[in-house]
Image (cartoon, helix red, strand yellow):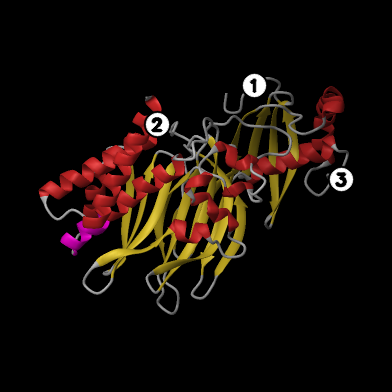
Amino acid sequence: MKRYQLRAAALSVWLAVGLAVSHGPASAQDDAAAKAAFHAAEAALNHHFNGVFLDDDPRAPGLLKAVWRLVKQWAVDYLNRHPAATATELKAAIGTLSPDLNTEAMRLDARTVLVSVSLTSLGTVFIIADRGHRFGIAWAITDTAARPPRGFGMLATWLADRARPTCRESPRVSVQESCGSISGTIGKLPDQRDGHHRFYLDATYGQPMGSTVAAQISIWKLTNRTARPLFVKAYNYMIDQSRGTRVVGDVLHLAMKTRFKTFFVCGPCEGRQLDWRIRIGPDRIENLGEKSLTPEVDLVDTLFDRMLKRKMTKDIATKAVTAVLKPHIDKVRKEAGSSGLGDALGYFWGSAVTVRNGRKKVCVSTDNGGTFLFTIDSGGSKLRLSTAQYRGGETCGG
């Protein structure tokens, strides 16, 4: 009996979707019917969605597609009734479908609107364009995800059947970053020299727990009311970090979290922060690479790493500095033994950079290495540690 009830419920969802998409809301009565269809589709989806991933039921991807179809149809119908609506008004209109929908919208020009919608970690992106006095869906990210151009395989993440944890176990999946779930935020970029609009999609992969998360940045250009990918790459960040994605002039900046060489940080800690810069040139996209936001701590980390591995250090530290560190580093190396030297100094308790009497000081505190206060001399753009003091179990700034 339960099997037939589930089939009947699924059939009612598909009928509701079909009716809503076929006719679209044109009156208060039709609005109510469209909302009812969405609520039915959302309820059916929630039986197969744990807040992060879809389950392995073969019906789950279809239910997610049904939800997105209804969202897109609702947005299109709203614009056809309110063609002069602002992006803010369209966002609010989509939000009336469900309080669980997170929506972003922006007009790329007077006839084209870019929309990003998500239900927690499940997301989609689409473009609505005016096609001769009527708005319609010009492009959806799933169009590109289904047939990604060469070099853009990770965009397949946006497909509904990739939003399951078992995706990474499939022999058909060659790019691990092409498994979701995923949802993202959108932003405008400078137009190309030929006038084509460009935008970015900064997306986050769903994961059950943890504050350090995987992300995907992609850059697109609008061509004939559809979008074509220009750049895509995965990176990591901390969800509550102080810096976020931003555009300054013609440069897109992304805040990345990466690992130190000899000590580790907690998930909710910002850790080693990089400013990843991508230039949005008139004719091309140029990856400018990453710039460390903690160069002083990086210098100390590099010194620890070289001394642990018995490598040359004279270009980054004086003999006086290495003499202070040597007994502590020898002890750490011995205790690490066969377990390896990765993260040998243990947990990173913190750091502090100050300027005293015109000279820069950096304090670094780790679990296994203790706390050291260094003086940094700079010759042009090159930094070198000139003095070191062992502070035992003190904390930096404590």
Q: Position of residue 325 (x, y in %)?
A: 80, 31
Q: Tell me how far mark 3 sits from mark 2, CA to CA.
A: 59 Å
Label 2: how many residues lie within 10 Å, few (<14), some (14-19) or many (20+)? Answer: few
* Residue 380 visible in the current orientation: yes
Number of the front mark, 1 or 2: 2
Q: Position of residue 190 (x, y in %)?
A: 42, 68
Point out the tag, 1 or 2, that comes first from the N-terminus: 2
The answer to whether residue 82 is seen in the rendering is no
Specify the amino acid type for callout 3.
Answer: Met
Residue that lies at the very extreme toward the top in this rendered image: 393
Examine the residues drawn in magenta and state their main secondary structure: helix
Q: Amino acid at mark 2?
A: His
Which residues fall within the magenta stretch? Answer: 75-83
Q: Nearer the viewer, mark 1 or mark 3?
A: 3
Q: Which residue is found at the position 51% from the left and 75% from the top?
A: 283
What residue is shown with label 2? 47
Task: Name the residue tied to disc 3.
Answer: 312
Residue 294 spot, x, y in % from top left:
61, 44
Which element is circle 3 on?
A: loop
* 26 up-or-down from 293: above or below: below
Left or right, residue 42 beside residue 180: left
As for residue 119 lying within the magenta part, the answer is no
Label 1 sits on what residue type?
Answer: Glu
Residue, disc 1: 394
Q: How many marks?
A: 3
Residue sitting at x 81%, y 26%? 332
